[in-house]
Amino acid sequence: MQRLRRLAVHCNAPVGVFDSGLGGLSVLAEIRRLLPQESLLYVADSAYVPYGEKTQEQIIERSLLLSGFLLDQGAKALVVACNTATAAAIQPLRERWPSLNVIGMEPAVKPAAAQSRSGKIGVLATTGTLRSAKFAALLERYCDQVKIFTQPCPGLVERIEAGELSSAATRELLIGYVQPLLNAGCDSLILGCTHYPFIRPLLREIVGQDIAIIDTGAAVARRLQSLLSADELLADAPEPTDCFYTTGSQDAMQQALPVLWGSAIPVRELYV
């Protein structure tokens, strides 16, 4: 019955995506690139950013609220475009809506381990992601193959939310987080937060060309494509639509979109 109910959704229904703020736009861009005919609903929970400083209970509550809103808007699938929310809430979300495709994030330890020459990998992430049981299990899975060094990055999400992708203050903050990983001999850096791909150019300037920089946005888009295809839910809309919501400042998100999304799109305020 659950399976039939999922397949009853129209193929041109939108894909729902949420993040603690604007970082999930990096994942949304990969979805748009791979699946240009899909309509997209995006919620930035910027009134509660960053999730990394919230309790697990708070993150679960927000994730359930935002997901419920996206489903009320007709979303046919849900992408949790936030590593911290995935770690805390992916299981409760799947339990609440067992017939729904729910795709989450996972730091790209597997591909990093496969390509590392030194056997030492650095993970840049929020405190919430690094202290989660899900991340601990991921580390345990690969601890025999590589040595993994973790680096919490407090304050970095806030810089990115403010659009400071290359400022002197952001550079100084990032150098302080990256240098210990380089000193430890890491030859691969995993971006364990969906905000961090937006400062990839700055990070590349800091670490040079010999260090691999890895994130999972493209992998999430491929997983979404696979699940929609299996359920015959890939869209064929000639004119897909993008609809953006924020629980924070409408003006702030509107100003950030040309930088982080590449175009200005109307933003709606959401009160949940």
Image (cartoon, rainbow, N blue to C red):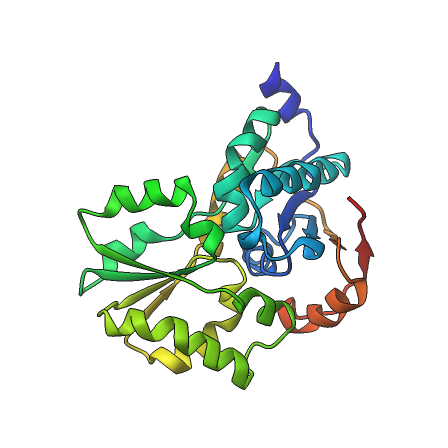
Q: Residue at x 40, y 76 (%)?
A: 176
Taking depth in this image into account, of 176 and 25 the one nearest to the observer is 176
Drawn side of residue 137 relative to residue 13, left or right: left
The reply, left or right, for residue 18 in relation to residue 188 is right
Camera-nearest residue between 171 and 3: 171
Choose between 22 and 27: the one closer to the eye.
22
Which percent across, then down, holds residue 96?
A: 61, 26
In the rendered view, would you say 189 is above or below 230? below
Placement of 40 over or under 118, stated as above or below: above
Residue 183 lies in quadrant: bottom left
Residue 185 in view of the camera: yes
**Relative to 136, is 91 above or below?**
above
Q: Position of residue 234 (x, y in %)?
A: 60, 40
Q: Is residue 202 left or right of residue 119?
A: right
The residue positioned 65% from the left and 50% from the top of the image is 37
Residue drawn at (65%, 36%) of the image: 64
On-image quarter of the N terminus: top right
Q: Is residue 231 in view from this perspective?
A: no
